[in-house]
Image (tube, helix red, strand yellow):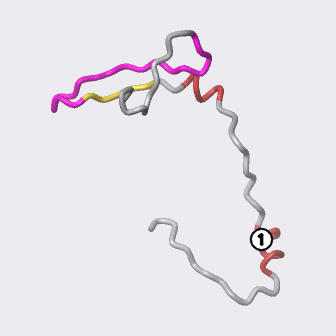
Amino acid sequence: MECNNIIRRINKPANWCSPMVRVLKKSGHVRICVDLKRLNRAVRRERYILPTLEEITSKLAGATVFSLLDASS
């Protein structure tokens, strides 16, 4: 993964760096395991507050075209 520029070796301390362990599977493949607790504490997440039904219906007033989306597909 390092040769393919997917991951990068860090040789000095970093606050966001997460510990990584290589585990050999029975099939001979390598599984990468990472503990992302420290990284998750450092990530700043954007908060999106869902609109209320009243806010949505007021925006739809006078609309003539609607569509239906299937989120499972």
Q: Residue at x 26, y 28 (%)?
A: 30
Residue 40 placement: quadrant: top right
Q: Residue at x 64, y 26 (%)?
A: 41
Question: Could you say whether the residue bearing mark 1 is in a helix, strand or loop?
Answer: helix
Q: Residue at x 65, y 32 (%)?
A: 43
Question: Is residue 39 left or right of 9 when viewed as pictured?
Answer: right
Q: Which residues are magenta?
A: 13-29
Residue, disc 1 = 56
Per the picture, the main secondary structure of the magenta-coloured stretch is loop
Question: Is residue 31 left or right of 17 when viewed as pictured?
Answer: left
Residue 15 in the magenta stretch? The answer is: yes
**Where residue 54 sits: x, y (%)?**
81, 70
Question: Is residue 28 left or right of 66 when viewed as pictured?
Answer: left
From what the image shows, is residue 9 above or below residue 47?
A: above
**Where residue 69 sits: x, y (%)?**
55, 74
How many callouts does the rendering have?
Answer: 1
**Where residue 2 sits: x, y (%)?**
38, 26
Check the picture and name the quadrant holding the C terminus.
bottom left
Q: Viewer-proximal residue, 55 or 23?
A: 23
Q: Viewer-proximal residue, 52 or 25?
A: 25
Q: Residue furthest left?
A: 27
Check the picture and name the quadrant holding the N terminus.
top left
> How crowded is the residue under tag 1: few (<14 C-alpha within 10 Å), some, or many (20+)?
few
Residue 34 in the magenta stretch? The answer is: no
Q: Residue furthest bottom?
A: 64
Residue 27 placement: quadrant: top left
From what the image shows, is residue 33 above or below residue 11?
A: below
Q: Residue at x 54, y 20 (%)?
A: 17
Q: Residue furthest top?
A: 12
Residue 22 placement: quadrant: top left
Which three-letter amino acid code belongs to the residue tagged 1? Ile
